[in-house]
Amino acid sequence: MRGLSETGFRERSLSASPYVLIIQVGMPLAVFALFAALFSLLDTAMASHLGTIDVSTVAYMNQLRMILNSIGTGLGTGSMILINRAYGAGDKEKTNELMNTLIRLMLILSAAFLLMIPFVPFLLKAIRTPDEFIAEGTAYFRILIVATVVNFVNLIYINVEKSRGRTGVIMIANLSMMVLKFILSALFIYVLDKGIAYIALATLITYASCAIYALPHLFDRKSIFCIRPSLVLRPRKGYAKSLINLSYPVAVEDSAFSLGKVIVNSIAASYGAEMIGALGISNNVSGLAASFENGYSDASSAIVSQNYGAGKYGRVIKVYKASLVVTFVACFAALSLLYAASDWIIPFFATSKDGLDAGFMDTIRRIFIYDSLSCLGIAFGGAGMDFLLGLGRTRITLFLNFLKIFVFRIPVLFILQHFISDGATALGIMMMISNCGAAIPTTLICIAIARELREKERMQG
């Protein structure tokens, strides 16, 4: 796929077998997502070596970082829907102008995030962060804010390469980042015996290295997606509004999703601060399977946008069906491997420099038993959400994510607290119910929209 030109991939996106396309484009994305999950898991592993409070602090602060990251990711994801439509319709000029409008919006957002850095301690106290987390995590979170801003460059580059169908490049870049991250983190924690702030520093250095690689590609004048400073500074009137209108539901839904995790962490803290770490570890381990399967559904989003922009409505439905099948098969394979390896993965994260904490290991395992089953719901829900995103139905995805967090997750946990005395079991069941439960309305809505598209195709032909 890498050898295809941008025009060549567009033609393939509009004509090749949906199954072949999703597998070819999705395989590198799945590997990329898997290693991105390992990236997060690596932070957890390093923090586990330092102690349970350290790993709980990292889990808590990473959820706060995800709120910030979700705003940028939402802006990028929503904007790429319009960019891919223009690309699918063959409008090169509009594609490039929309791309440069996105860059301008990202620069404004980055400046706003950087201005938050001096006020981190006050923000943490305002959201009632446990005092032991503030003491450990202030420097860690400040560095993560800078890393998040730098990573916006990488997010844009990844989205562009995905639109080109060059997902193999994403996989190679991410593998390189993973190796660098591992070397730096191991040096800081195991050799120099530093604290969790140095874990964040390793993340920042790694993101910066990838951004240095990405920038020349984003400024390539031969590309439809080229960054042009003149267009960044003088965008066409109305384009920024169009991108924001389509993107803000995605940003809000992703931020609300992360905020929901912060609320869940606050509830989990009532069982003890170490429960936040156990839940975070279980989520990260289960996330290996979930991230792998989501790589395939993620591949379908750009393909759906491009075909919708070209008016191929029947083919859009075929892409969704192929995404469901491929994602479920990937889910089954990933879960099988995860269960086979869980007996040595979980003890690894319960072992610090003081040795194995058997009680902490048992807590992680009790959550993981149910949490891992969430991957089945994530497979169907993820295929549906990427189908909806590809169509630009961002308000529907916003509704579905609110449903997931504020109907299937937080209220369910409150109810379970009254019937299940064991916090670990309650948290695991909560994760299973929320992810599997939310997949049901998502799939039903997708079926209804597919029928609309089928009718639209019939009237068109």
Image: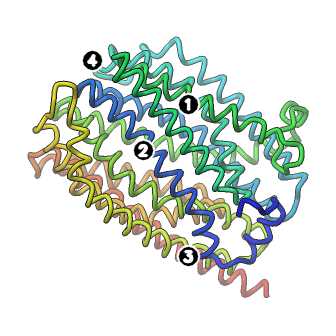
Q: Quadrant of the C terminus?
A: bottom right
Q: Which residue is mark 3?
A: 322
Of badges 1 and 3, nearer the viewer stands: 1
x%, y% of residue 389?
60, 59
The single residue placed furthest to the top in the displayed view is 118
The location of residue 133, given as percent across then percent down, is: 31, 21
Is 449 drawn above or below residue 439 in the view shown? below
Gap in angstroms between the C-alphas marked 2 and 4 = 26 Å
Mark 3 or mark 4: name the one nearer the start of the chain: 4
Query: On the image, which quarter does residue 276 sit in?
Result: top left
Height in image: 305 above or below 319? above
Dot 2 amino acid type = Leu
User: What element does badge 3 sit on?
Assistant: helix
Vertical comparison of 31 with 439: above or below? above
Does label 4 or label 1 sit earlier along the sequence? 4
Q: What is the C-alpha distance between the residues marked 4 and 1? A: 28 Å
Q: Residues within 10 Å of mark 1 (few under 14, many from 20)?
A: many
Would residue 343 appear left or right of 216 to someone viewing this image? Answer: left
Name the amino acid type tagged 3. Ala
Residue designated by label 2:
38
Q: Check disc 1 and give the amino acid type.
A: Thr
Mark found first going from the N terminus, 1 or 3: 1
Q: Which residue is mark 1?
A: 206
Depth check, front residue: 97 or 54:
54
Mark 4 lies on residue: 132
Location of residue 167 in the rendering, given as x and y in whole percent from the top left corner: 64, 56
Amino acid under label 4?
A: Glu
Secondary structure type for disc 4: helix
The Cα atoms of the two marked residues, 1 and 2, are separated by: 14 Å
Labels 1 and 3 touching (C-beta < 8 A): no
